Image: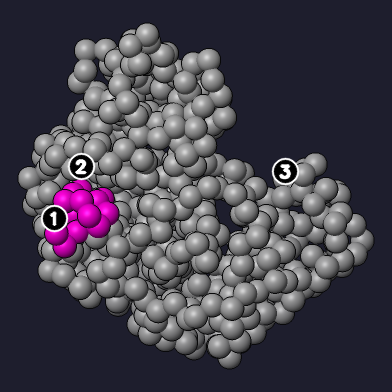
């Protein structure tokens, strides 16, 4: 079974009992709490203290967050198990997922940093208070991470006083470790340092949103800082900030996948038991189409995420392919989640507004995911730098298997300077696309060739077009993203033993999406005649196959009717 089902847990073959125990205990905690209490807390905006207490009691963040060499003797950091825990938290509610997500964001600068003594002290702090916070954003600067009004002011005795405010900081009300990014006054040096949200010189000003999760504004009023509190400084602090985001934005795609999976079950159950005009809703032709499309898109999200996990775990100084797949996980998967949710809402209509189900809160919460840790625009501007190397300069790499073992994901904490992004090489994407002889994948290959033709006829002019028109950059980048997305879906489908009928149906929507993006690029005012001709070759229709469609509907979609319903 591809989708998460807490009532029929699929063993992910972890190498140790502890990993599976964490997942099962977390599921049990949510199911014991029940939907009614969860919704009551959501409506009253009750901060998730109960979840924090559970996490602390079970030592879950210690197991998930700490790299090898810290905590227990058998400790290791695994993106594979982080993926599933993130998905489970998203499945039950954004407030729980957010508490998890910003805690790992807040802790990672510690273990990326240079302060060994603080790393060991952080382990003890985490055991007492598992909540952490990542103090990066500022109200007046937003995503402009080059600017910072948070300063460390040097004192005569060699210490510092921290002054300034941070804005939009999750867990800033309760975090035992708040890692703060700023500058040393009188220098150009960036600095990462740590503070405690309960210190008298730390003021938690407000929750800047009207929600259950706490997204704080905080101010440091001459907060005393010594060298013992400084995690990194100078260029290293800058790199650690970006590398923290590189590690943690991966959570956004898995969290979104969890949210949509829960909504999918609710929508399917509702439609299957609702009779209109003498028919069950699941019998209507347009509903069948919406369910197949939503299931295939959701399945693609899961397949991509599982495969991207392998590349995160396999990362090294010689293999940085994760720096493409990671922003796709954050951006593409989260946006696909929104698309799936809209389809499901079209099916259940007014039911999606009702207060007693998970769906209505997911409508609001899911839309925030693509906006976290860099907007679509920021991530796409990064991704398009990789187009030349991805398409025209493939490297040689050993095949990467599904990585489920107890290895520590060492390189994530050793990423080093954030330079040379455009020089990253990839294995030949054609290997994946040529591994399957399916009708829609064959059409998709034709569309890729048309995109390659577009790139060739564009030449150096394309760079200027994208630099002068961000809308053009987005259009070019959407197609590139789709190609890489499809590549990992095919690779993952082989590992997960997905049948060819379902894979071909997945590429039915992929072909349609490619055509939409191609037409959009064709329509841009700055597209040349040669570019327009290449774009029109991308506009193709998928191969229709009613038997395949009916099989996917029966065996993969409608077989899940009543497979999951959350405990009341």
Outermost residue to the right: 529
Tell me which label, 1 or 2, sits earlier in the chain. 1
Q: Which residue carries the number 3 mark?
A: 470
Q: CA distance from mark 3 to mark 2?
A: 45 Å
Residue 73: in magenta span: yes
Direction from residue 372 to residue 353 in the image, left or right:
left
**Mark carried by residue 198:** none
Direction from residue 532 to residue 289 in the image, left or right:
left
Residue range in magenta is 61-75
Direction from residue 338 to residue 111 in the image, left or right:
left
The residue depicted at 25 percent of the width and 57 percent of the height is: 68
Q: In terms of depth relative to the viewer, which is nearer, 542 or 373?
A: 373
Residue 210 can be seen in this image: no
* Rendered position, 527 above or below 545: above
Q: CA distance from mark 1 to mark 2?
A: 12 Å
Q: Which residue carries the number 2 mark?
A: 120
Q: Which residue carries the number 1 mark?
A: 72
Direction from residue 506 to residue 40 in the image, left or right:
left
Tell me which label, 3 or 2, sits earlier in the chain. 2
Tell me which label, 1 or 3, sits earlier in the chain. 1
């Amino acid at each position: 079974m591809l989708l998460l089902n807490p009532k029929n847990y699929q063993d992910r073959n972890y190498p140790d009992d502890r990993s599976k125990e964490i997942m099962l205990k977390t599921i049990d905690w949510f199911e014991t709490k029940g939907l009614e209490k969860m919704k009551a807390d959501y409506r009253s905006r009750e901060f998730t203290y109960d979840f924090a207490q559970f996490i602390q009691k079970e030592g879950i963040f210690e197991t998930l967050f700490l790299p090898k060499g810290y905590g227990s003797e058998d400790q290791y950091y695994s993106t594979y198990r982080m993926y599933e825990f993130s998905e489970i938290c998203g499945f039950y509610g954004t407030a729980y997922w957010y508490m998890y997500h910003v805690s790992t964001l807040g802790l990672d600068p510690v273990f990326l940093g240079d302060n060994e003594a603080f790393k060991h002290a952080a382990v003890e702090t985490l055991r007492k208070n598992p909540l952490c916070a990542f103090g990066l954003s500022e109200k007046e600067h937003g995503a402009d991470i080059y600017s910072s009004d948070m300063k460390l002011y040097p004192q005569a005795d060699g210490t510092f006083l921290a002054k300034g405010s941070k804005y939009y900081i999750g867990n800033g009300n309760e975090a035992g470790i708040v890692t703060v990014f700023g500058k040393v006054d009188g220098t150009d040096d960036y600095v990462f340092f740590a503070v405690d949200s309960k210190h008298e010189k730390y003021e938690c000003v407000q929750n800047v949103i009207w929600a259950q999760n706490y997204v704080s504004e905080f101010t440091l009023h001459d907060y005393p800082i010594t060298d013992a509190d400084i995690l990194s400084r100078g260029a290293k602090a800058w790199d650690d900030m970006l590398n923290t985001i590189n590690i943690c934005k991966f959570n956004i795609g898995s969290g979104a996948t969890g949210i949509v999976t829960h909504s999918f079950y609710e929508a399917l159950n509702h439609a299957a038991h609702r009779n209109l005009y003498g028919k069950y809703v699941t019998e209507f032709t347009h509903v069948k189409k919406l369910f197949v499309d939503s299931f295939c898109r959701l399945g693609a999200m899961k397949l991509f995420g599982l495969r991207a996990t392998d590349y995160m775990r396999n990362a090294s100084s010689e293999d940085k392919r994760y720096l493409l797949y990671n922003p796709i996980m954050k951006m593409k998967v989260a946006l696909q989640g929104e698309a799936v949710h809209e389809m499901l809402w079209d099916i259940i209509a007014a039911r999606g507004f009702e207060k007693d189900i998970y769906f209505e809160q997911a409508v609001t919460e899911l839309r925030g995911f693509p906006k976290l840790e860099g907007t679509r625009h920021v991530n796409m501007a990064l991704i398009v730098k990789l187009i030349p190397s991805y398409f025209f300069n493939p490297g040689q790499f050993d095949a990467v298997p599904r990585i489920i073992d107890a290895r520590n994901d060492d390189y994530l904490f050793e990423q080093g300077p954030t330079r040379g992004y455009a020089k990253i090489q990839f294995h030949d994407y054609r290997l994946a696309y040529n591994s399957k002889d399916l009708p829609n994948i064959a059409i998709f290959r034709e569309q890729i060739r048309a995109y390659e033709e577009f790139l060739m006829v564009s030449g150096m002019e394309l760079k200027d077009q994208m630099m002068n028109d961000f809308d053009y950059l987005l259009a070019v980048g959407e197609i590139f993203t789709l190609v890489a997305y499809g590549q990992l879906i095919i690779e993952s489908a082989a590992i997960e033993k997905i049948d060819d009928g379902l894979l071909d149906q997945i590429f039915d929507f992929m072909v349609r999406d490619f055509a939409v993006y191609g037409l959009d690029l064709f329509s841009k005012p700055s597209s040349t005649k040669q570019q327009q001709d290449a774009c029109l070759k991308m506009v193709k229709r998928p191969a229709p196959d009613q038997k395949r469609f009916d099989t996917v509907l029966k065996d993969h979609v409608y077989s899940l009717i009543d497979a999951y319903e959350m405990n009341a």
